[in-house]
Structure formats: structure tokens, C-alpha cells
Image: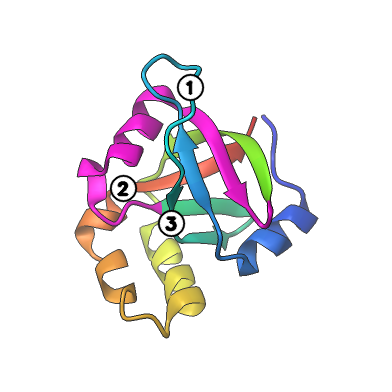
Amino acid sequence: MKRWTPAQLQRFAVADDLRISPFYSDGRTYGTPTWIWSVVVDQHLYVRAWHGQRSSWYQSAVQQRAGRIYLAGQNYPVSFAPVTDQTALVDAAYRQKYGQSAYLLPMIQVGPQAATIEILPR
């Protein structure tokens, strides 16, 4: 399994430009890029869907399990894996990175927590 390099993770940890594009149902066409918050926890890259599991990009990511992201100024082909066991650590990372934002509290609620995804390089 491929992993992000330490240098990539360092850049990702401070970047705030992640755009996620899971494949459409054909498995070949990238979806419309959606800007979302990202965090790095214990050498893993995570994102959450603002609208929880109802989010269209989240549903595509779970169904297709692959796509592309734009982060830290570059595009990357990626795989997606739903996460259920890192909620508290991801919450803490969101608090640290986005603590000054009025949007923080909704992102650490049950709906978005249930729509946490790990992003892995392909």
C-alpha cells in the first residue's frame, strides 16, 4: 500500500486548498472539484463532508473508492477509505487547524464525524 511521504504530509498539514474529485459512477471521469477542509493525524490525511453521509462527493468517494485531489498546489490520484475509529483525533486536528473559524463546531458534530474519509495515494 502506498503512503504519503513525510514531506508531503508536512505540506498537507498547513495547506488549506484541498479540492476533492471522486470518480463518477463510470469509474473514469473525475467529479467536479469540491473544496473541503483537510487535516493530517498520525501520518494520515483525513477529510470530512460538511453535510455528512448525504454529501454527494462523500457518496461517490465511498462507492468509487478512488479519484483525485488537488492539495498544496498539486493534483494527486488517490484512493478513499471511510474511517470510523479516529473521530476524537480528527476532531482535535480540526480544532487545532481551524479553531478560529465559525464553521469549526459543525465540522466536529455527529453528521460530519460519520463522513470521515482517509485519503491515500494511488
How much space separates mark 3 and mark 1, taking CA atoms?
20 Å
For label 3, the crowd category at 10 Å Cα-Cα, with few meaning under 14, some 14 to 19 and many 20 or more, is some
Mark 3 or 1, nearer chain start: 1
Residue identifier under label 1? 29
Task: Kindly report which numbered mark, 1 or 2, lies closer to the viewer in this rendering.
Answer: 1
- Tag 1 and tag 2, C-beta contact below 8 Å: no
Q: List the residue tagged with mark 2.
A: 115
Question: Does residue 12 belong to the magenta stretch?
Answer: no
- Using residue 102 as the reference point, say whether residue 93 is left or right of it: right
Q: Position of residue 59 (x, y in %)?
A: 30, 34
> Label 3 belongs to which residue?
36
In this view, 8 is above or below 121: below
Residue 27: x and y, percent?
46, 17
Viewer-side residue, 103 vs 7: 103
At mark 3, the secondary structure is: loop
Q: Residue at x 49, y 28 (%)?
A: 30
